[in-house]
Image (cartoon, rainbow, N blue to C red):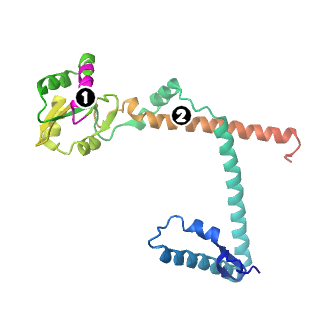
Amino acid sequence: MTSNEDGQNVARFNDSYLNKSDFSELMTNYSVEDSIVKANNVINNWAISKILIEKAKLNLTESRLNEIESLVEDYRSDLLSDSYLEALVNSTINLEVDSSEIQSLFDSNKDLFLLNEDIYRLIFVELPQDFSDTYEVRKRIRRFNKKDQYFLDSISFRYNNYSFDSKTWVSEKKLLNEFNFLNSYSYRSLKNYNFYQYKDSLSLYLIKIVDSAKKGEISPIENVLSTLEYMSLNQRKKEVMLKIKTNILKDALLNNKLEIY
């Protein structure tokens, strides 16, 4: 039995000890302010676990104990084999995105990408109330060709806020959250005319819809690119995993480590 003469233990139950190192790890997520209460909880939970384990060993039937040990061993085996297999896959797999593969996945799974809400590509500018070139900015926002974009970029330091990221798709929900001044009427106006302006005591907001896709339509591929990349990677992982399993079986058979009767 280990004593606590060196002061390295925090608690003891029979021959089991909670040492300071393990105790500190259990306390890592707790703040200093309520450390005393949390420390007691950690110690109590550790003790309860040890007591219950001892009671279980004394009171559960032998068959049940054997069943638990078998489950534990199965779990340990699965954890070891799955972890090693995952490490092999990760060290082997090609992580580069293949655009043709992405397109093929999209074309063969379009039914999975039906939109459940309208989405938009848009730009916006927030101008201060004393802005001197409001008319010019409004005109170029509404038209927004390459020359307009260059001009608008060149004076962007004068805006309160802006975004000319016209390639990213934004959901209806995100749009309404971002521009909380949009009500049902103004939102319909923006959809119908692809442009809306709003003025408050501080700023003038100009919003331009560059492109849109409606609920029930197939999503643009750019909007689901991250999902397609995940599908592609997952598909490649399955293929690599199957190849690794096949190879390790062949290797074990060739080296007489595995015999199948």
Please name the residue shown 34% across and 32% down the image: 168
Q: Amino acid at mark 1?
A: Ser
Q: From the viewer's perspective, is 1 left or right of 237?
A: right
The question of residue 160 being in magenta is answered with yes
**Magenta segment boundaries in residue numbering:** 150-161
Q: From this view, report whether residue 135 is shown above or below residue 87.
A: above
**Circle 1: element type:** helix
**194, 214: nearer the viewer:** 194
Kind of residue sitting beneath label 2: Ser
Q: Quick check: 23 above or below 84?
A: below
Q: Residue furthest top?
A: 147
Of circles 2 and 1, the one toward us is: 1
| Residue ID for mark 2 | 232
Q: Is residue 131 left or right of residue 108?
A: left
Q: Name the residue nearer the viewer: 47 or 85.
A: 47
Taking depth in this image into account, of 23 and 8 the one nearest to the observer is 8
Residue 47: x %, y % from top left: 61, 79
- The x and y percentages for residue 158 are 21, 30
